């Protein structure tokens, strides 16, 4: 990895939080970019190395800051993270234990009973979000930092939309809970807990309007969960996780929530194959989304012919329903 510019090194030393680093980079971007450009001018054989590193570092902090909360619903599922790089459309296989041996009474043969393990095939796809600042954009005052937030949000939404594709009544056929946002309350949480009575882990994903109906209840004096707050904030109410989701376009009609055991849906997250591009015009790195432990690839590169600076985020992801009896939909109608 290329050595960061002195200004960028000092910034990382002062701020341990990605959000704090991102905020300071926005404030000091002209100085940081000028410093990186001076290094690039001296490094003739590796043009754009430092400025590409700066953009990549900026993108990493922006991605972590924004993805940390928007991908929180994924924690409700059974996720596996791979350190191996995946080819697009490669098939990964998960193990799903569907049956155990028979419990014996007054056994005479203690080597009796086999478990059943079924394979679950998950097709992996590469999801990429790229954006650029052209020479004309640059002369008109547009900067790369102006584009990070909206593109990170679109990247996050795409992965959430893919993860929620199995959330349909055709797949999860258990009786859905039907409620409007205004009437949704703790009695509905009790109903969902009853539906998940055999599940030792109870997770819940809710649309923001439904979560708002239970997030502020002064009559309850337990420390309740908050959006983006402590992961155990809802344990006093019998839930291991309640997470907010604001994008349900991938799910079935009128779906606004999902109560489940993690084994209801399995997901595999990993990194794509990284291209080897010589010449110092391509910088890439990986970062981990705290709380989810998923890795994404962040990169920046430069097109000399058009003087266009590009940045991008990539992840390999695949989701598949596994135990369709372990999840129940919440619908608005």
Image: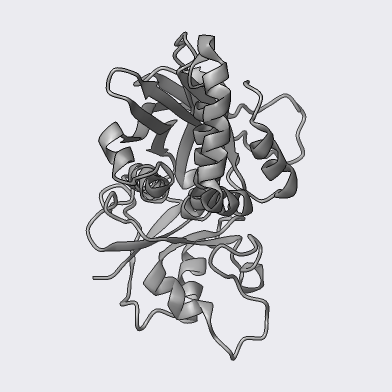
What quarter of the picture does the N terminus occupy? Answer: top right
Q: Is residue 240 left or right of residue 279?
A: right
Foreground residue among 224 and 108: 224
Q: For residue 238, what is the image quadrant?
A: bottom right
Q: Check the image and report above or below for 196 versus 298.
A: below
Q: Quadrant of the C terminus?
A: bottom left
Please provide percent x and percent y for residue 76. 51, 51
Q: Position of residue 310 (x, y in %)?
A: 37, 30
Residue drawn at the location 69% of the way across and 38% of the way down:
104
Compared to 68, does 159 lie above or below? above
Looking at the picture, tell me which residue is in the foreground, 108 or 280: 280
How many numbered markers are drawn?
A: 0
**Residue at 36 percent of width and 32 percent of height:** 128
The answer to whether 292 appears left or right of 120 in the picture is right
* Res. 78 in view: no
Q: Residue 145 location, x and y as percent?
A: 44, 46
From what the image shows, is residue 195 above or below residue 147?
A: below
């Amino acid at each position: 990895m290329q050595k960061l510019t002195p200004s960028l090194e000092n910034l990382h030393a002062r701020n341990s939080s990605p959000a704090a680093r991102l905020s300071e980079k926005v404030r000091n971007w002209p100085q940081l970019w000028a410093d990186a450009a001076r290094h690039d001018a001296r490094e003739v054989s590796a043009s754009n190395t430092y400025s590409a590193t700066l953009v990549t570092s900026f993108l990493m902090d922006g991605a972590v800051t924004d993805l940390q909360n928007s991908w929180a619903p994924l924690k409700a599922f059974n996720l596996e993270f791979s350190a191996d790089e995946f080819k697009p459309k490669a098939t990964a296989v998960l193990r799903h234990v569907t049956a155990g041996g028979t419990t014996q009474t007054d056994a005479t043969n203690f080597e009796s009973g086999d478990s059943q393990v079924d394979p679950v095939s998950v097709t992996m796809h590469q999801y990429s979000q790229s954006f650029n600042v052209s020479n004309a954009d640059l002369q008109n005052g547009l900067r790369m930092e102006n584009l990070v937030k909206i593109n990170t949000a679109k990247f996050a939404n795409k992965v959430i939309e893919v993860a929620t594709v199995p959330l349909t009544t055709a797949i999860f056929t258990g009786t859905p809970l039907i409620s409007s946002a205004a009437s949704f309350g703790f009695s509905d949480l009790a109903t969902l807990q009853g539906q998940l009575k055999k599940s030792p882990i109870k997770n819940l994903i809710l649309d923001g309007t439904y979560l708002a109906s239970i997030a502020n209840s002064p009559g309850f004096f337990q420390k309740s969960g908050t959006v983006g707050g402590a992961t155990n904030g809802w344990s006093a109410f019998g839930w291991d996780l309640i997470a907010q989701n604001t994008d349900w376009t991938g799910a079935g009609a009128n779906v606004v929530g999902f109560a489940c055991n993690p084994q209801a849906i399995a997901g595999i997250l990993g990194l794509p194959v990284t291209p080897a591009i010589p010449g110092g015009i391509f910088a890439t790195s990986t970062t981990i989304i705290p709380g989810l432990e998923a890795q994404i690839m962040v990169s920046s590169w430069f097109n000399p012919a058009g003087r266009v600076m590009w940045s991008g985020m990539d992840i390999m992801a695949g989701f598949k329903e596994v135990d369709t009896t372990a999840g129940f939909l919440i619908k608005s109608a």
